[in-house]
Amino acid sequence: MNNPTYYGICSNLKKIVDLAHEHGMMVLVDEAHGTHFYFGEDMPLTAMAAGADMSSVSMHKSGGSLTQSSFLLTGPDVSAGYVRQVINLTQTTSASYLLISSLDISRRNLALRGKELFAEVMRIADYARTEINKIGGYYAYGKELINGDSVFDFDPTKLTVYTLDIGLAGIEVYDLLRDEYDIQLELGDMGNVLAYISIGDRMREVERLVSALVDVKRRYSRDRSGLFDHEYINPSVVMTPQEAFYAPKEEMIPIRETNGRICTEFVMCYPPGIPILAPGERITQEIIDYILYAKEKGCQLTGPEDEKVERLNVIKESTTY
């Protein structure tokens, strides 16, 4: 499972782990965005503390190591030797000592100074959240989202800002901040921008961001009519991804002509990489409209064989399913 999400939303990890273990299942956690949980104070529960069997922790995201460097953590019921054996079978034996050394340096830095560093990150993020919510038209999410259920906990270092109320999609605000103000954010999607505040950021960078958001609203805000107000479409799953991917297919069908057909490939906006379509799902007009809207707004779409995402591969109509 994934915990936390890109946006800082956390599940009730302990309850999920206990339930899985009661049914003889192992729990593997994608904890890519949770490195700082292990080193900071007043952070959400870590996967290992919740009793997960394995967790992949991306030190390079919030821990300060070089890109591509991560830790794979194992619990007491997993043989580290067996994991190492499998890794040796499937990955290169020519390790990058540049990446390994960056992991060690970053781990040492956080072990010695992590509480201090992430306390400052939280202070900066809280300040930004407060100031952005004073502007009007934006909404910077915080711990008020916690409901003990779908949002069990929240990562306070994440600065996600809802933009639709100023009449702009998140990706449009993202592009404006980059092109007009020289501010590079982590991502922009249909309704939000995400600023990934790290141990390398200072208060003055966040003050620049707040000022830029004020200016974006003043110069570019408009009526929000015509904007998509939802980002998730419930999928109609007809067959498994494996069956669909390898099934006989009709290739490169214009996307506007695929309504009702079954897709054989992924379509997703990246980041964050959440699929709009997955192999085995039925294509609907709502999905087609969403993909075309995302392209129009400037989202980076990835997944299909056609890099321009103008055509899709679909199951042959004669295929039984």
Image: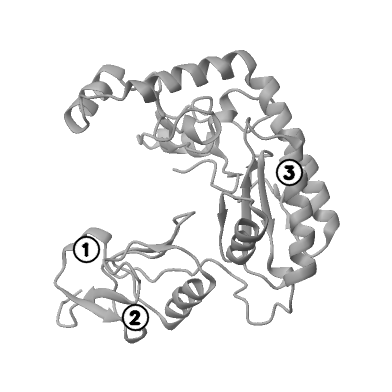
Eye-nearest disc, 1 or 3: 3
Picture coordinates of residue 32, whole percent (x, y):
47, 37
Q: Quadrant of residue 251?
A: bottom left
Q: Amino acid at mark 2?
A: Ile
Residue at mark 3: 206
* Mark 2 crowdedness (10 Å alpha carbons): few <14, some 14-19, many ≥20: some
Q: Is residue 311 left or right of residue 27?
A: left
Sequence order check: which comes first, mark 1 or mark 2? 1
In this picture, residue 125 sits left or right of residue 52: right
Q: Which mark is residue 255?
A: 2
Mark 1 to mark 2 CA distance (whole Å)? 18 Å
- What secondary structure is marked by label 1? helix
Classify 296 as above or below 100: below
Closer mark to the observer between disc 1 and disc 2: 2
**Residue 229 screen position, x and y as percent:** 62, 72
Q: Closer to the camera, 66 or 123?
A: 66
Marks 3 and 1: in contact by CB < 8 Å? no
- What residue is drawn where x is 67% and y is 21%? 115
Camera-side residue of 62 and 240: 62
Which mark is first along the chain, 2 or 3?
3
Question: In terms of sequence position, does the residue under pointer 1 or pointer 3 come before the other?
Answer: 3
Q: Which residue is mark 1?
A: 245
Badge 2 marks a residue whose secondary structure is helix
* Mark 1 Cα shell of 10 Å, populated few (<14), some (14-19), many (≥20): many
Residue 124: where, in percent of width, then height?
75, 37
**Label pair 1/2, CB-CB below 8 angstroms:** no
- Distance of label 1 from label 3 (alpha carbons): 44 Å
